[in-house]
Image (spheres, rainbow, N blue to C red):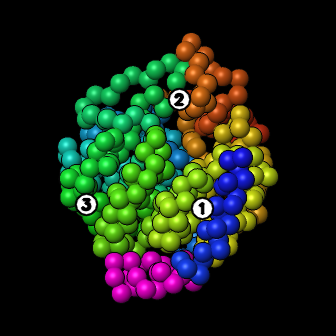
């Protein structure tokens, strides 16, 4: 039933393409003047290699704060693991930021982003940065982060700015400073592919209460006017108002899909009706039927960017499924996400052989 609702909702979005284009044209006189036309977006996309890679957090970090705080910023692990991404032909990495790391150490945070970008660039990798996020734990604290809960998927991952903070407009002025400081500093940095302004807005039961912050995030980014495109990814096909907003205001279409090939193909065909290039910024959950072997060839065939979750099995515990914890902490027979172990060995050599073949990297 949910899939039928989704397809109907997507066709509604597709049927509103003319309305979207009209709204964008009218908005050219106001705050949304810089939403990229389809022609500009396609021209940008055509200048890229096929966008292929993974969501990334170093295996030594349980969450975004542990990745970005000064005491735990691990350039050794980042460099090693991005090298593994390079070696299988990945050219793009999607990485989450966190505003609390910026609040605690503004100049240091910017410097660490620059260090990370230098490492990624040395490996031939561009980066998609995620600004806000509605997934998992709602109340992050700076300082030492908790140890992983054995066998629990993303036991320490953090929402940003969290709950109820994302709903409280009193927090918006500080969040505006954060968005403009980060995007403003890197607005012309060619090492950055795209700004993903809000990951899965409305998740964790928030629903449309996240729409005001989502709206503000796009407004703040437009006021900075980065040279890179901005977007936010569709993921919940029942959120009609949120989806309509993201389609209308994103320069390129990004989306998440963890279903099998037949379903994913339908999603692509419907989203294509909007006439803009597309990047799937999350896919690959083996036990749900979303695998490299069936989804990655599809995305290449359809000329859709392909960013799987994730790269190296580590403290995030994303080898375990969302809803199937293994409290004994044993390695599951079939990993949910991820490609590499911390020692550089791979879960399934057939997968990396396929990835290398599709990316043009010699096996």
- Image height check: is 273 above or below 314? below
Mark 1 Cα-neighbour bin, 10 Å: few <14, some 14–19, many ≥20: many
Residue extending furthest toward the top: 328
The answer to whether residue 33 is magenta is yes
The residue at the point 33 percent across, 63 percent down is: 216
The answer to whether any part of residue 209 appears in the image is yes
State the CA–CA distance, disc 1 to disc 2. 25 Å
61 vs 242, nearest the viewer:
242
Q: Residues within 10 Å of mark 2 (few under 14, many from 20)?
A: many
Q: Name the residue under label 2.
A: 153
| Tag of residue 288 | none
Which tag, 1 or 3, sits closer to the chain's start?
Answer: 3
Residue 263 in the figure: left or right of residue 281:
right
Return the residue nearer the eye: 209 or 70. 209
Which of the 4 quarters of the picture holds residue 344?
top right
Give percent across and percent down for residue 154.
Answer: 48, 32
From the image, tell me which residue sits under label 1: 279
Q: Relative to 122, does residue 165 appear above or below in the rendering?
A: above
SS state under label 2: loop
Give the extent of the magenta segment. Answer: 21-42
The picture places residue 357, in percent across and down from the top left corner, at: 75, 53
Residue 288 belongs to the span the image colors magenta: no
The image quarter containing residue 348 is top right
Mark 3 is surrounded, within 10 Å at the Cα level, by few (under 14), some (14 to 19) or many (20 or more) other residues, namely some
What residue is rendered at 60% in x and 37% in y? 338
Q: Where is residue 21 in the image (x, y as percent from the top left)?
A: 53, 81
Q: Which residue is drawn at 34% across and 57% down?
A: 213
- Which percent across, then down, holds residue 102? 25, 49
Q: Mark 3 points at which residue?
A: 176
- Determine the secondary structure under disc 1: strand
- The relative height of residue 327 versus residue 116 in the rendered view (above or below) is above
């Amino acid at each position: 039933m949910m899939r039928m609702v989704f397809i109907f909702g997507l066709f509604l979005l597709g049927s509103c393409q003319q309305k979207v284009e009209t709204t964008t044209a009218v908005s050219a006189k106001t705050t949304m003047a810089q939403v990229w036309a389809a022609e500009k977006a396609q021209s940008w996309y055509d200048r890229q290699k096929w966008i292929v890679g993974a969501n990334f957090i170093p295996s030594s970090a349980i969450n975004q704060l542990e990745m970005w705080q000064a005491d735990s910023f691990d350039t050794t692990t980042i460099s090693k693991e991005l090298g593994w991404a390079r070696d299988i032909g990945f050219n793009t990495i999607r990485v989450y930021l966190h505003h609390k790391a910026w609040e605690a150490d503004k100049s240091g945070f910017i410097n660490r982003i620059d260090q990370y970008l230098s490492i990624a660039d040395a490996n031939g990798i561009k980066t998609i940065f995620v600004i806000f996020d509605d997934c998992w734990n709602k109340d992050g604290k700076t300082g030492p982060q908790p140890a992983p809960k054995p066998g629990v998927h993303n036991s320490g991952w953090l929402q940003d700015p969290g709950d109820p903070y994302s709903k409280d407009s009193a927090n918006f002025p500080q969040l505006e400073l954060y968005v403009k400081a980060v995007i403003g500093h890197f607005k012309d940095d060619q090492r950055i592919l795209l700004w993903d302004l809000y990951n899965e807005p409305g998740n964790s039961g928030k629903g449309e209460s996240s729409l005001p912050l989502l709206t503000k995030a796009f407004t703040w980014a437009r006021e900075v006017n980065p040279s890179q495109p901005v977007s936010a990814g569709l993921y919940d096909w029942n959120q009609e108002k949120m989806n309509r907003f993201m389609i209308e205001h994103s320069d390129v279409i990004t989306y998440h899909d963890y279903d099998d090939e037949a379903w994913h193909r339908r999603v692509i065909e419907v989203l294509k009706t909007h006439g803009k290039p597309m990047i799937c910024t999350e896919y690959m959950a083996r036990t749900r039927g979303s695998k490299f072997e069936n989804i990655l060839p599809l995305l290449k065939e359809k000329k859709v960017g392909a960013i799987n979750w994730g790269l190296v099995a580590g403290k995030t515990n994303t080898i375990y499924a969302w809803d199937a914890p293994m409290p004994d902490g044993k390695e599951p027979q079939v990993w949910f996400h991820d490609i590499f172990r911390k020692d550089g060995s791979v879960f399934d050599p057939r997968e990396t052989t396929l990835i290398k073949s599709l990316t043009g990297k010699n096996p």
